[in-house]
Image: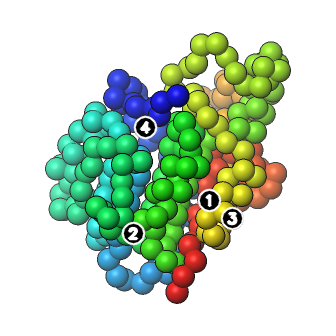
Amino acid sequence: MQDKNFDKLAQKFAKNIYGTPKGEIRASVLWRDLSPALSQFGERKLRILDAGGGFGYFSQKLARLGHEVILCDISAAMLAKAQTQIEASPTPLDIRLIHAPIQALSVEEHGSFDLILCHAVVEWLADAKATMTGLLTMLKPAGLFSLMFYNKEAMRFHALVSGNFDYVAADLVVKKKVRLTPTHPLYIDDVKQWFNDWNISIETQSGVRVIHDYLKKNQAADFDYAKLLQMELEYSQREPYLSLGRYVHFLGRSQGA
């Protein structure tokens, strides 16, 4: 098995991430979770690694706040898009681009980081836990790790309410994969155990798209997407909705002073 490279799908993938209402939900939930945690560092400039960050939506957002960011991605097309956006920024952004698989990153070459982001990456990896274990050798003591992953139970529930019972009976395996459907969705309890194994305490948990993906397909022409976003934020940290998020976001802190 090989890890996914989105070179051939860069434009479509970038649009699907942040160019739609579901992208706005994703960005809003993640930033709601990250903002108060970042404020705990005070005013100092942070070293941040955006691992598998694509065109660097959060890299750019964090760099605009004055932080030093390394953006790493396996896709040259995604990084080219990032470079174009960085160059178009009205203010200089302290972002260094690295074209490499995240498994190639090392603390010896790149140093350690106050915050590591890894969003919507692990579900595409052949060996997610081993890759994240290596990545976390670069996290400073008391540093933050922001991990968003594709939720297998939400994938199953969505199939159930859509009436795709044969798909569920086949344990969500199909002969022909949809190109943007993650190949290795994860269970929440498994990822929680990973954090325990890493000695990283989970400080914030959120579901991402706890409502959007279960809406009826045909909504009224005047459907209120602003209200949907409000409801997503309101219910994203409540059970049982959190565990039904298409993605789940864990924000954890490593041991240390």
Find the distance from the CA under tag 4 to the CA under tag 3. 35 Å
**Residue 227 coordinates in the image, percent (x, y):** 63, 49
Q: Residue furthest toward the bottom?
A: 257
SS at badge 4: loop
Query: Which one is nearer the viewer's eye here, 138 or 93?
Result: 138
Q: Give the residue at mark 1.
A: 250
**Badge number at residue 113:** 2
- Badge nearest the viewer, 4 or 3: 3
Q: Badge 3 is on which residue?
A: 196
Give coordinates of residue 88: x percent, y percent: 18, 49
Q: Are marks 1 and 2 in contact (CB under 8 Å)?
A: no
Q: Earlier in the sequence, mark 4 or mark 1?
A: 4
Instruction: Give the label, 4 or 2, closer to the camera.
Output: 2
Give the foreground label among 4 and 1: 1
- Helix, strand or loop at label 3? It is helix
Identify the disc placed on residue 42: none
10 Å neighbourhood of mark 4: few (<14), some, or many (≥20)? Answer: few
Label 4, label 1: how many angstroms apart (C-alpha)?
23 Å
